[in-house]
Amino acid sequence: MRNVAVIGSQWGDEGKGKIVDWLSSEADVVVRFQGGHNAGHTLVIDGITYKLRLLPSGIVRKNKISIIGNGVVIDPWAFLDEIDEIKSKGVKVGLDNLIISESANLILPFHKEMDEIREDAAGKAKIGTTRRGIGPAYEDKIGRRSIRVMDLISEKNLSQRLETVLLHHNAIRKGLGKNIFKKDKLKEDLLKIAPEILKFSQPVWKKIYEFKKQSKKILFEGAQGILLDVDHGTYPFVTSSNTVASAAATGSGCGPNSINYVLGITKAYTTRVGEGPFPTELKDDIGEKLGTRGKEFGTVTSRKRRCGWFDGVLVRQTIKISGIDGIALTKLDVLDELDEIKMCIAYEINGKKIDYLPAAVEDQLKVKPIYKSFKGWKSETKGIKKFDDLPQNAKIYIKELEKFIETKVSSISTSPERNDTILIVDPFKS
């Protein structure tokens, strides 16, 4: 038995949805372990497009168990809406294939409003959040005042918990000249949907232990990317959770020895949504071409993604930080029409050459990329399923990329379709 953690090695949007869906044909259990409905995965299966935000990608596959772990923050209304949406496309969702952690923290309406208030007030210093309330919900979790799934069981307990969290939020809202939140109305709204939420609730740590004893293959599904990690990303332009592979253990309730292989999803170029440093960003026709061919718009917000050349320095750095064993290289076909392709192999800052991204945001904004150029292959790779069938220049680019990042390429994606994948190493069997 081998369990696999799938994480993004860049700023998210690397194509994790397709890869997780592709791997879930072998997995028995798929676990979301961090983030919330701010991170979307798009799957294309038999011509049907599924846009998932909170539900694990395994939910669209038969005979798979999907789990939302304790490290995830859940908007209960968005959760129920997403279930209804996915059911309308013929997907079965029930107690036999979906479990949510009783310890997961809830995103409430005042979290979303606080997210919006802060972003609007920040001006040029805005982070570029999805305005879904993720950050404020994690703040309440760390502040030990949040509402968890288990708190919906008791009306008395829920009332006390709401009293605590609203004492904090209403003080801030008063100071900002905003209306305060009424506890009784919020409690009434939560109790109304409580049965629909609680029926999926279980001690996830216990279920995962049972699945391990049964030798089930577990796939841990990360959201976003390592460069958005609150500790290791381009802080403060990051998310509010840990997106590195080790978060799979804490965010689901199992030991790190439960993860046998870490797969880093890596786009053949680089994209970023929102604000923050982006050393290889292209603000020219090539950047526009990458965005158009790659259909670079956010699943959740439909925001246009910023595009740039592949940053080997950053990917090599995230591989070391997160213990990535192999990468799944995605969207290779987007580069098909380019005459020249570049890869960042170092940075220059204040006249000095460096081989990593500094931690200080001021330095991150100053670094200038040093590139290595490759000849484009100028032929279609879409749908190719064997490495030997790739154009020679595409093979050269991949081999040089692999050599620079010091990690094996385990698979190559040549279109959004699930089967258009070149498998080199099977993470479940390697």
Image: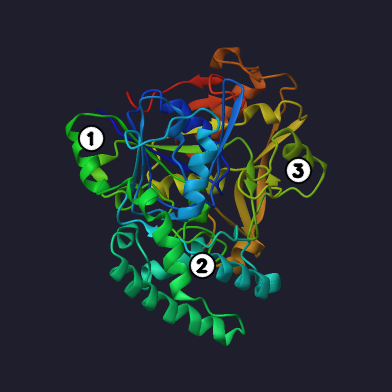
Q: Tell me if residue 101 can be seen.
A: yes
| Residue extending farthest right | 285
Query: Marks 1 and 3, how far apart in space?
Result: 45 Å
On the image, the x and y values in percent for residue 316 come to 49, 44
Front-most of residues 196 and 42: 196
Residue at 75% of width from left, 32% of height from top? 340
Mark 1 vs mark 3: give the one in front.
Answer: 1
Please tell me the numbered disc located at residue 23: none
Q: Amino acid at mark 1?
A: Phe
Look at mark 1 in the image and give the residue it sits on: 211
Q: Quadrant of the C terminus?
A: top left
Q: How is the image coloured?
A: rainbow
Query: Marks 1 and 2, how far apart in space?
Result: 34 Å
> CB of mark 1 within 8 Å of CB of mark 2?
no
Look at mark 3 in the image and give the residue it sits on: 287
Query: Marks 2 and 3, how far apart in space?
Result: 35 Å
| Residue extending farthest bottom | 175
N-term mark: 2 or 3: 2
Look at mark 2 in the image and give the residue it sits on: 111
| Residue extending farthest left | 213
Q: Quadrant of residue 116?
A: bottom right
On the image, the x and y values in percent for residue 3 come to 30, 34
Q: Is residue 30 left or right of residue 318?
A: left
Q: Is residue 37 left or right of residue 31?
A: right
Q: Quadrant of residue 365?
A: bottom right
Q: Is residue 356 above or below residue 23?
A: below
N-term mark: 1 or 2: 2
On the image, the x and y values in percent for residue 154 come to 28, 64
